Amino acid sequence: MPLHSEFDSISSLRNALRDRKISALEIAQSALEAAQGRSDLNAFLHIEPELTLAQARRADEALARNEAAPLAGIPIAHKDVFVTKGWRTTAASKILQNYVSPFDATVVSRLEEAGAVSIGKLNCDEFGMGSGNENSAFGPVRNPWHADVVPGGSSGGSAAAVAAGLVMASTGTDTGGSVRQPAALCGVSGIKPTYGTVSRFGIVAYGSSLDQAGPLARHARDLVELLDVISGFDPQDSTSLMMCDEAENEPGRIRLDFDAAVQRQEVVAGRPLEGLRIGVPREYFNEGLDNQIAQAIEEALKVFESLGAKRVDVSLPRTRLSIPAYYVIAPAEASSNLSRYDAVRYGYRTASYGDLEDMTSRSRAEGFGPEVIRRILVGTYVLCHGYYDAYYLQAQRVRRMVVNDFQQAFSEHCDLIIGPVTPKVGKLIGENRADPTADWLADVYTLGVSLAGLPAMSIPCGFTADQRPLPIGLQLIGNYFQEGQLLAVADRFQQVTDWHQRTPEQR
Ligand code: GLN
């Protein structure tokens, strides 16, 4: 196991680095070795030891001068949709198989400035399209808990690398569930922040009104550290949010408010969540939900109640409608975003072609995988003159209704919402090959949050009773900008449970 796996959290590893008990270089070397040793998982797409070791040396120099940034020497890895100078960025697509970006994504440069050491680039579904990480042009990622089971997608490499202990934390993106689903299925924690909180600059675009980056790690507390670094206004992203209402704040920073949220919870000793109203949407608990997941969530709710929280019944009536709405809007945006892959400026180009049009169409037909082509066809169709009003516009209306459902729940009934992340666990790799849209239905619990742009996270809350137990995730959904509260509540849960500390090795 890599050296960092002896440390339980980012802060304990940071202390060891600052006390010179271990160096960033030693950490990086052992993490590289571990990542290369787990090629069976197919979690990493590109490893560039020289780049990693150079980052580690810089971290050691800063540590030696006592000028280390907060994440100096912490081993992380990026989903391969974040562009990186030096490393290839493929979005797990053949069309970008040899692409090297001339610049870094904002998330990448902020983490680098914070001293984090990147071990490599992580496999994912092609352009983020999928929920099982089976749609990568470079083969599926395997779940560290069971090699035949999907790790969840699209940030499957990000979740598998953390679950297997190869890195302390990773970056992912979530367009309709892609941080939360793999976090749930690999038994780690992951957060998708409020839309606009983290810059999309340098993230290979899928659905621009939905895409949002977020970190994955074992503990909610570690997510706080990463989110703190990557969030905040970025003039290079036109939908990046600037908070200017609070004079005392550094302009342009979203205040995570984690510490304040923790302090607010200290009012009644022993019952840190006293008075917190947790909404449980009845539409999330129906026949479609696996019994073992329902039970694990029930047990988790009891833990929250023992900490003082109160459970209230809420309704999100448009839950099911979020599926057709999302699968119109996301492909529509994708069809537009993916039009840039024309084989002229960059990316894969077919070997033989006639005229310019033939070159572009052959290159796209050969370069995109079947799921991406399906999305481009759907997206182009719903944007066509004559179908636009019937599909695209209608989907946007449903999107507004989904927003209103959440706002009604938050304004009238509850402070946060709890529910499942996925309806099932244990899906085998290749199981839905004959019916690709079956996967779309399994996004039912995550899409609404994405359509509404709300923050949500997944934390481990139990295991199946199988001979080879598989992790079960719990979804926490907050109102806009309440990621601090979400993380604080998740942290309280993790102080009294140990689901997040289990590893596939000690199972
Ligand atoms: N499963 C959804 C899709 O395929 C969400 C993926 C994501 O969040 N990137 O579009």
Image: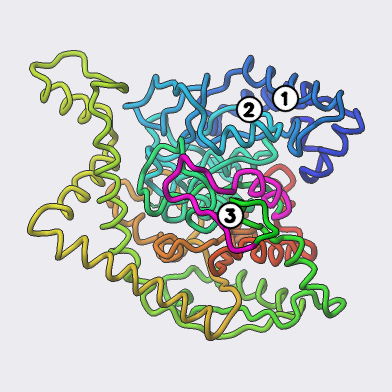
Q: Which mark is residue 191?
A: 3
Residue type indicated by callout 3: Ile
Residue bounds of the magenta highlight: 220-246
Q: Which residue is mark 1?
A: 28
Q: Which residue is mark 2?
A: 119
Residue 119, quarter of picture: top right
Q: Position of residue 253 (x, y in %)?
A: 62, 52
Which of disc 1 and disc 2 is earlier in sequence? 1
Magenta stretch holds residue 221: yes
Few, some or many residues within 10 Å of mark 1 (<14, 14–19, 20+): many
Q: Position of residue 85 (x, y in %)?
A: 51, 22
Classify residue 284 as left or right of residue 261.
left
Q: Can residue 424 be seen in the rendering of this structure?
A: yes
Measured Cα–Cα span from mark 3 to mark 1? 25 Å
Which of disc 2 and disc 3 is earlier in sequence? 2
Q: Are marks 2 and 1 in contact (CB under 8 Å)?
A: yes
Magenta stretch holds residue 204: no
